[in-house]
Image (spheres, helix red, strand yellow):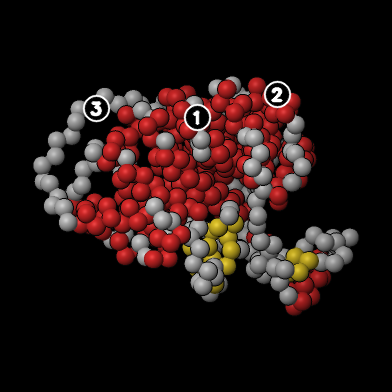
Amino acid sequence: MDIISKNEVDFFIDHIKESKLNELGSKIWYDSHDRLQKLNQQATLDATEGREEYIKDQLISYGKVPIIVHEAICVAIWREKVLPEVLCVIPNPTQSFTLYFILFHETVAVGLLQKILFHEEGVQSLGNCALDLFDHIIFSITHIAIGNTNNFQIYSKISDTPLVDEIIEHKHKIQFEVGICCIGIMFNMLLHIKNLSLSVTTRMTTNNDVPMLICQLLNVKPWIKLENDKKYIFQDNSWKIMDEKENIIPKQEAHLWLSLHEFFSSEQIRNSYEITQFRKKNLMQLQHLLNDCLLDQIPPLRHLKQCLYQLSLTEVSTVYKRPLIIELNAEIRTTILNTYSKQWKKIARIQVAYLFGNDSYEVAKSLSDTYENIDHFEVKENICANCRQPAKNRCSKCKKEWYCSRKCQVTKWDEHKNICQ
């Protein structure tokens, strides 16, 4: 089953253009979101089934990859600057789906970028915006490493939650999912480091300390959460009850270990990375995590283990002369911030009119086809309509609501019977 035909792919890609921050959520913008989401769904389908990756090839040949980077950064700035103002203008919103679509646009953009950058020619196609993308992914990964945005509830009782709190929950969940996806992008960029500029490698070793960020993530493991006396793990884009006996390394953790391996395997990066006492101490703490189970699943890490052992025997130099490097500046974020500086409240007041107006329901209806098949691409557990825990039983009549037990179904029946059909 295809989502869009090749002719539609060519048309959609030809019409991809940079979003304007003050137009996010407008009817024109939703058309762009619809096209990008369908391209992402089709690209996922092609990659999953091992087909020719036509969308990746066309995006590269049309020179559209930098635009997708712009889309991710633009939404991130909107989330940071405009969304808080929107919630000040309308503290008791009547619905949340229009805001969700804008926030989800960043997930779509980084998901598409991860598929493109898996290939060497994809990394080459970034050009000067590689620096913009690297800054963005480090910002997103840092959020899940040390930020407080991981304090969302996996299976919160949405019916008992004020809508404004539900919006904040959605924002945090999407930020988390974006951060996890950015781990994969960081690995792809390290894998093809020879195709990136010196400015990017300097960012990795000096401005942004990639190995220390990885150390933090591998120690705190934000993809594992304890909720309602159950341990959950984020795997395959969804939260699942963790099986302690399974011991399968989740993809994002594998990407982090392999990123560290690529970092120390690259002479280009390793020679410009100063090993201080602080860095050595943190890297040495990873040695106990490199157990037989991990090494059996990711054999290249045996070389990393050897590198860490050699590092443990090396004296840390107290004298280090940093080379003089003329760096490029990331332009996309700076340009957007300068363009809309001091206009955040004004933009919020204008956007509230169409985000929560009568037309918002028409927008949701127009996007129903886009999200109709989303379950084929995002494997998620069914949630009990009553207690919000994982559920395996579905209402036999309407087949819309799920329940974890007969008790929950009976408890919910007085409310559910009015809509069951």
Q: Residue 332 versus residue 58: which sits nearer the camera?
A: 58
Dot 2 crowding, Cα within 10 Å, few <14, some 14–19, many 20+: few
Task: Give x and y (percent) for residue 288.
Answer: 31, 65
Q: Which corner quadrant holds the C terminus? A: bottom right
Q: Is residue 171 above or below residue 123?
A: below
In this picture, residue 88 sits left or right of residue 280: right
Mark 1 and mark 2 lie on one chain; the one further toward the N terminus is 2
Mark on residue 11?
2
Query: Which residue is located at x 80 percent, y 60 percent?
Result: 400
Q: Residue 190 versus residue 220: which sits nearer the camera?
A: 190
Mark 3 and mark 1 lie on one chain; the one further toward the N terminus is 1
Q: Is residue 215 something that shows in the picture?
A: no
Task: Give x and y (percent) for residue 364.
Answer: 74, 41
Query: Which residue is located at x 69 percent, y 28 percent?
Result: 9
Camera-nearest label, 3 or 1: 1
Dot 3 crowding, Cα within 10 Å, few <14, some 14–19, many 20+: few
Query: Which residue is located at x 10 percent, y 42 percent?
Result: 319
Label 2 close to label 3 by CB (< 8 Å): no
Task: Report the residue marked by disc 1.
Answer: 121
